[in-house]
Image (cartoon, rainbow, N blue to C red):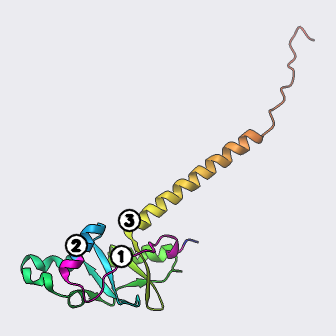
Amino acid sequence: MFMAKDVMTFNVVSVRPDATLNEVAALLLRHRVSGMPVADAEGELLGVITEYDLLPMVYDPELSDGLVMDHMTQNPIVLSETDALVEVADRFISTRMRRLLVVQDGKLKGVISRHDLIRFIRETRQRVAKAIARQSQSSDNQKPASKKRPTLTTQDA
């Protein structure tokens, strides 16, 4: 059975709670992600900040200097490394979240996006199909050639 740790991204870009919204906006754009975890210096997960949280900067330019801790979502939905992929899929479906954070003992271990899960399932199915095709070809090649019986013709009789 596949688990969250089989799909998750381990080297997660995170941001500190004392970063500014302008700094987090730059990180989101540089890493081409729509959100990221907020963690302290020890790696303890504090929340998540997303593009959606940055949208108020459109109305108030001074918010660019605001701190992540004042705009992040606290107590995000989290997973364990050992959660089954069906549980991961259930969480995505029930919450409509784009990414789920993986924690162990309160520490950030990784992240799984919907994109990651879909890619993993597709690639795994393709590998299985290829393995089945190879196995089928291998077993076809190992079958002994059928021996043809001589056929009697009226001349032989």
Badge 3 local density, few (<14 within 10 Å), some, or many (20+)? few
The answer to whether 141 is drawn above or below residue 9 in the figure is: above
The quarter of the picture where residue 13 lies is bottom left
Residue at horizontal 24 percent and vertical 85 percent from the top: 19
Circle 3/circle 1 CB separation < 8 Å = no
Report the magenta residues as a range.
3-24
Residue 121 in percent (x, y) is at 48, 62
What residue is disc 1 on?
A: 13
Q: Does the segment drawn in magenta span residue 11?
A: yes
Question: Mark 3 against mark 1, which lies toward the viewer?
Answer: 1
The tag on residue 26 is: 2
Residue at horizontal 20 percent and vertical 88 percent from the top: 67
Element type where label 1 sits in the image: loop
Q: Residue furthest right?
A: 157
Q: Quadrant of the C terminus?
A: top right
- Mark 1 or mark 3, which is nearer the start of the sequence? 1
Q: Residue furthest top?
A: 155
The tag on residue 115 is: 3
- Mark 2 or mark 3, which is nearer the start of the sequence? 2
Marks 2 and 1, how far apart in space? Answer: 12 Å
Question: Mark 3 against mark 2, which lies toward the viewer?
Answer: 2
Residue at horizontal 38 percent and vertical 69 percent from the top: 114
Q: Nearer the viewer, residue 127 or 8?
A: 8
Residue 30 in percent (x, y) is at 27, 68
Horizontal side, residue 65 vs residue 85: left or right: left
Residue 2 in percent (x, y) is at 55, 71
Q: Nearer the viewer, residue 69 or 41?
A: 41
Marks 3 and 2, how far apart in space? Answer: 22 Å
Q: Tag count in the figure?
A: 3
Marks 3 and 1, how far apart in space? Answer: 17 Å
Circle 2/circle 1 CB separation < 8 Å = no
